[in-house]
Image (cartoon, rainbow, N blue to C red):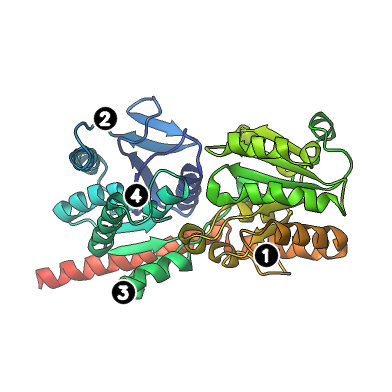
Amino acid sequence: MTRVLHVLDHSLPIHSGYTFRTRAILRAQQASGIEVRGVTGLRHTESGPAVQDVDGLLFHRTPGEAYGPAGWREWREIGKFAEAIDLLCDEWRPDILHAHSPAICGHAAVRVADRRGIPLVYEIRAFWEDAAVGNGTGRDRSAKYRLTRSLENHVVARADAVVTICEGLKRDLVARGNDPERIAIVPNGVDLSLFGKTASRDLRLAEELGLGSGPVIGFIGSFYDYEGIDDLIAAMPLLAKTHPEARLLLVGGGPREAALREQAARSTAHEAIRFVGRVPHSEVERYYALADIMAYPRKASRLTELVTPLKPLEAMAQDKIVLASNVGGHRELIRDGETGVLFAPDDPVACANALARLLDNRDCWPAMRVAGRKHVESAHDWSVNVQRYQSVYQSLLVGEAESRLETVA
């Protein structure tokens, strides 16, 4: 049985898009007969035991802290992480190291893979320098931006195989001079065994939130600037002119929450906008069930053009109508007019008009719901996605076996 050690920035029990994708990958690989474990670096800050079982998955933690000025601190962090991976390799003997971005995870894994001769897969879920710009913690083309990009390029060059979550990321890596044959795509997915049943609308919850009887437009996720929630709020007064009964339900939180609440309070449509705040992940399906349309108005940027989000797929799995801005990440997931509707990004008027057209043409909703659900089942269910990893692993293990035979001969 193949053993795969996943090298991770952080993991469950922390809840994030990163940890939920990791859980889905590891669960699907376990179900397919692969033995898996995870090891997290110093950035996993949740307290807990050195070895932790979460949802039937085993995670090992890297002890200690890294100190010093920027640069030295990260170098020491990589060193401590590599030591923890190396010790675990002594104990568990994995066949493959599978490191997940950011590049610090990749660098630590490269050190161990090179020393031990273990095949290394490096998976990129986003370019973290672009994510930092998108969430306001970094500046485009700054020294830190360029350094992060350089570190990632180094890991990509040293890995035996590279995985990305979408075509946009792969195209960018190929444009940097990387061989496309070394880069596989394992797209974002939904674990339909966990998230595949549509909940019934909770009438009491709808009443508590004052949603009324009209259509509900929902957004569930993190409140970052690049998500474009300000454009969605700005669209509501325009939509109210033709659909005064419509309500906007915003579930989540993040750096832009205070500014968005202030914007909504000043809006002439403020009575139609509801903020719920963050909710436990186990409660998310109750809020999906309240919405008729899930809206994803991401702004146009390098991040949103290259990276596919998970949320539209979750919405399709929940049989929701999906409305999204026409950026590259959304175009990879949504066929306009078939599995959802796209509108011009950074344009509240276009958003309002698209919402109005959807509300005026509900006859198309049943077919769109069915098409969206089928799209997730056929191309984005983790029970299907996991086979893509099998192909990558098998090619590496076959290559390693052939190399050993040549050495013996």
Question: Alpha carbon of mark 3 to alpha carbon of mark 1: how far?
Answer: 32 Å
Secondary structure beneath label 3: loop
Q: Amino acid at mark 1?
A: Leu
Q: Amino acid at mark 3?
A: Asp
Quadrant in which the C terminus is drawn: bottom left
Secondary structure beneath label 1: strand
Question: Alpha carbon of mark 4 to alpha carbon of mark 2: how far?
Answer: 19 Å
Dot in front, 1 or 4: 1
Secondary structure beneath label 4: loop
Residue at label 4?
Answer: 102
Q: Quadrant of residue 154?
A: bottom left
Residue at label 2?
Answer: 63
N-terminal-most mark, 1 or 4: 4
Q: Are marks 3 and 4 in contact (CB under 8 Å)?
A: no
Q: Are marks 3 and 1 in contact (CB under 8 Å)?
A: no
Could you tell me residue 266's position as x and y percent? 72, 37
Give the side of residue 397 with respect to residue 378, left or right: left
Could you tell me residue 331's position as x and y percent? 59, 67
Question: Alpha carbon of mark 2 to alpha carbon of mark 1: how far?
Answer: 46 Å
Checking the image for residue 179, the label placed there is: 3
Q: Amino acid at mark 2?
A: Pro
- Give 320 or 243, whichever is nearer the viewer: 243
Could you tell me residue 317's position as x and y percent? 67, 54
Could you tell me residue 355's position as x and y percent? 77, 57
User: Badge 4 local density, few (<14 within 10 Å), some, or many (20+)?
Assistant: many
User: Badge 1 local density, few (<14 within 10 Å), some, or many (20+)?
Assistant: many
Question: Alpha carbon of mark 1 to alpha carbon of mark 4: how far?
Answer: 30 Å
Q: Are marks 1 and 4 in contact (CB under 8 Å)?
A: no
Residue at label 1?
Answer: 342
